[in-house]
Image (cartoon, rainbow, N blue to C red):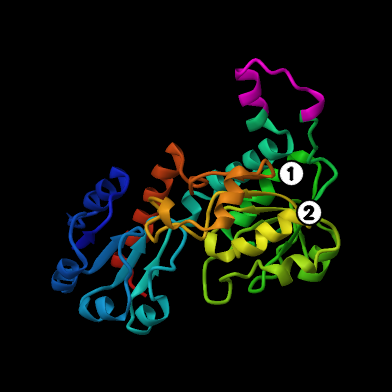
Amino acid sequence: MVLFIDSNHPVLQQTLEKAGIRCDLNYQWTEEEIASNIHLYEGIVIRSRIKLGKELIDKGTNLKFIARAGAGMENIDIVYAESKGIRCLNSPEGNKDAVAEHAIGMTLCLFNNLCRANQQVRKGEWIREGNRGLELMGKTVGIIGYGNMGTAFARRLKGFAVRVLAYDKYKSGFSDDSVIESNMKTLEEECDLISLHLPLTEETHHLVNDAFFSKFKKPIFLINTARGKIVDTDALVRNLESNKVKGACLDVLEYESGSFENLDASKLPEAFQYLIHSEKVMLSPHIAGWTMESNVKIASVLAAKIIACLKHPA
């Protein structure tokens, strides 16, 4: 029996039930209600509404798995769960293509001033020279983190005649016709754009800060479709102001709430005000992986992993 505490595409429930797995949908349960009932279930399916720390995990005495619909796992104490024999499942394969396309779309919009030009034309302004753009062709793109998202992004870049370098602290031997495996020093010396494809961990929190930017030989563009807290926004603004960063595409912000559903405007600092007024910045509300297709694929991928976990436990 599996507990769903967040809504998902119906294909997830349908696929599990077709495999003979009972699903209980309790999207409105409070953390206290989850704690009181979690011992009844072999698995729990979450998104971002609830954090599964040691206390809740301890109460899940029959849990075989914790499954998150999506990529990020920062709201699960993975180390503790796995120490108790609970498998932690996610489905980054489901939205990797959406993230890759979104990152390219944001970059093209920024390079070609499309948002500004669109608004100008709608107001009857026909400004050509002031909207002269940049081409991706010939640029060197650096990817930090070469998992599902980074790999998909590199493959989408193949048609743009760019040079793609990638660095992953925990992965090697991945050079192919899409990417050249590299190191941070080479990225710092040669890249025009940097795209982040990292999970949020203690190690990556504010990884992108003043010290990070200072190491780059050339002014760079920054793309972040990963997690907002990887970037120190104050540092980003300082480097945008100094032109060390020529522009930024941000699908995520460190000011997002844990559930990614809203921003509390009354609590947003001065750095955010700079971002929303700067024409050097492209913003979107954490929707890089949020497509019609990815919604289905995330559910399908996760269903397959859950079925394998219950039918063939490690």
Region of the chain picked out in magenta, as a range: 117-130
Amino acid type at circle 1 is Lys
Image x and y of residue 9, in percent: 32, 45
Which quadrant holds the N terminus?
bottom left
**Residue 308 can be seen, yes or no:** no
Report the disc number at residue 243: 2
Amino acid type at circle 2 is Asn
Report the disc number at residue 158: 1
Q: Looking at the image, which residue sits at the far bottom? A: 83
- Left or right for 283, reference 125: left
- Left or right for 233, reference 50: right
Disc 1 crowd, CA 10 A, few/some/many (<14, 14-19, 20+): some
In the image, 111 versus 234, the foreground residue is: 234
Whether residue 25 appears in magenta in the rendering, the answer is no
Which quadrant holds the C terminus?
bottom left
- Left or right for 119, reference 310: right
Task: For marks 2 and 1, give the CA distance.
Answer: 28 Å
